[in-house]
Image (cartoon, rainbow, N blue to C red):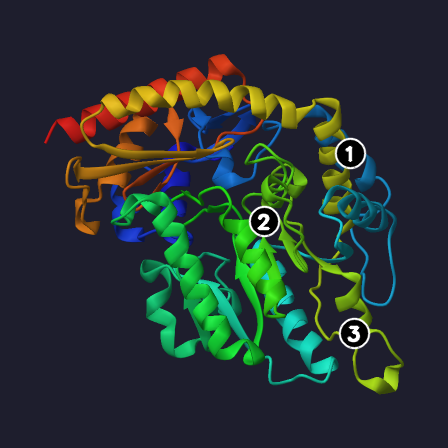
Amino acid sequence: MENYEELLQKNSQYLWNPFTQMKEYLQEEPLIIERGKGVKLIDVRGREYYDGNASVWLNVFGHNRKELNDALSEQLSRIAHSTLLGMSNVPAILLAERLVQITPDRVQKVFFSDSGAEAVEIALKMAFLYWKHRGKPEKHIFLSMQNAYHGDTVGAVSVGGIPTFHHAFDRLLFQTEKVPYPYPYRFSGTEQECVETCLAELQKKLEEKADQIAGLIVEPMVQGASGIIVAPRGYMAEVEKLCRQYDILLLADEVATGFGRTGKMFACEHEAIEPDILTVGKKLTGGYLPVAATLTSDEIYQAFYGDYADQKTFYHGHSYTGNQLGCAVALANLDLFEQEKIIEHVKDTSEQVAQWLKEFYQLSHVGEVRQLGLMIGIELVKEKESKKPYLLEDTIGQRVCNRAKELGLITRPLDSVITFLPALIAAKDELREMLDILYQAIQEVTESE
Ligand SMILES: *Cc1c(COP(=O)(O)O)cnc(C)c1O
C-alpha cells in the first residue's frame, strides 16, 4: 500500500474526475476509497461512511457481497471476455432471456452495451433507422423533455435538457423538440393543472409535426438528474396514449429507475406503460460492472431483419458488448432480487422512510421532499413561503453534502436538491441513521447563515 501522502500527491497530479470542478475539489482533502462493506464505504485511512447515494445510483445489495463476488470468480475461471460481434456467449444469452422475462411485455429483444449513455445512443439510432427501414425517413426528429438527463455522450446530450450540464454544447447537438415535464412545486397552479399544461404542450407538438417525429424519449415516473422530479399519477399513462395516437415510438429510459429503485421492478409498471424501446443500466449488475442494455419490441427488430444485401444491418457495437463477467454478475444480481425479495423489502422500507421524511418539513429551508420508492430528493429553498430558490453560487447543496460527509454519509447534490438513493438492501435502522445525518447536516448548514 502506498503511503497516504504519496497517494494524495499522485491523486492531484494524475486524475481528472467526472462532474467535478478540480480546483475546488483539490482544495479539500479528497476522499480515497479503499474498501466497501454492506452499505458502507471505507477510505484508505480506515474511516467509514454510509454510501448514501449507492455510489451514484448503482448499488443494490451492498458492497463486497459474497454471492456476487462468487459469480465473478466462477465466470473468471472460464473466460473474462469474448466478442458478441457475429457470435455469442453463455451469460449474455441467459441474461437477455432474464431481461425479457422481467421487463414490460412489448420489449422482446436485448442489445447490450456498457453504459446508460450508450444504451440511449443505441435506442435513438434504432428508432431513427426503424422509420427509415419502414419507408418513412421523414420521421427523424426526437421529442424529449425539458430538464431531461439521458447521459453524457453527444446523442444523449442532444435529448437532454439540463441547462447547467448541456447548454454549453448546444452547437454540437442534433435538433430535438422539447416539451415540459410536470414539476408541480415550481408551477403556479394545482398539480392537475400542471399535468394538463404539460400534456397540452405535448399534444400541440404532435399535432404540428408528428409526421416528422421518430419518437419521444422520457424518464418514466421520475426525472432523476434534474432533481428527483416525481411525475403526478396518471401523467405517464397519458403520455403513452398520445404516442400511440400520433404514431410515434415511446422510448423509456429506466437507467435510473429500473431494477426496484421506485418500488416496482420497473417504473413503467406503476402505470402499466409498454414502451417500444427500454434502456437499462446502473443497477443491472448490482453496482459491480458496467453493463447496460437497450430492449426493443419485436416489430422494431423485424424492421432490421433481412438479407445482407438489404443493407439493414445495425452497424453499431462496442468492444465489450455482452462481456461475460458483467453478464454473469448481472445474472447473480437478478437471482438475489428473488432470493432477498428485494421489491417487497423496498416497499416496506420506503413506506417507513416516507414517515420519517415528514420530519424534514420542520426545517426552515426544506421546500419540498420528493420520493418514489427509495428515490428521494430534498429541495432546499432560501425562503419557504415564496419558494425562493438558492442561487448556484450559494453552493448550498454542496455545502450540505460536505457536512454530511464529515458526519459519516456520502451523497451528492443536484444543485439545491439533496439526493438520497441508498442501496436497496439498506435496513430500517441504517436508513434511520442516514436520515439523521442528512437532517443534522441540512439544519446546521442552512440555519447557520
Ligand atoms: C445515469 C443515467 C444515464 C446515463 O448512464 P451512464 O451509465 O452514466 O452513462 C442515462 N439515463 C438516465 C435516466 C440516468 O439516470
The label shown at residue 254 is 2
Between label 1 and label 3, give the one nearer the viewer: 3
Q: Position of residue 367 (x, y in %)?
A: 25, 35
**Which element carries disc 3, helix, strand or loop?**
helix
Q: Is residue 226 above or below residue 172?
A: above
The amino acid sitting under disc 2 is Glu
Q: CA distance from mark 1 to mark 3?
A: 36 Å
Q: Position of residue 56 (x, y in %)?
A: 48, 41
The label shown at residue 71 is 1
Q: What residue is rendered at 78% in x and 66% in y?
A: 299
Q: Is mark 2 within 8 Å of ligand 1?
A: yes
**Residues under numbered marks 2 and 1 in contact, where contact means CB atoms less than 8 Å apart:** no
**285 left or right of 422 in image:** right
Q: CA distance from mark 3 to mark 2?
A: 24 Å
Which sits in the foreground, 380 or 19? 380
Q: Which residue is mark 3?
A: 303
Which sits in the foreground, 133 or 420? 133
Which sits in the foreground, 270 or 411? 270
Q: What residue is rendered at 48% in x and 16% in y?
A: 430
The amino acid sitting under disc 1 is Ala
The label shown at residue 337 is none
Instruction: Classify mark 1: residues with Cα within 10 Å, few (<14), some (14-19) or many (20+).
Output: some
N-terminal of the pair, mark 3 or mark 2, is 2
- Location of residue 297 by image quarter: bottom right
Q: CA distance from mark 2 to mark 1?
A: 25 Å
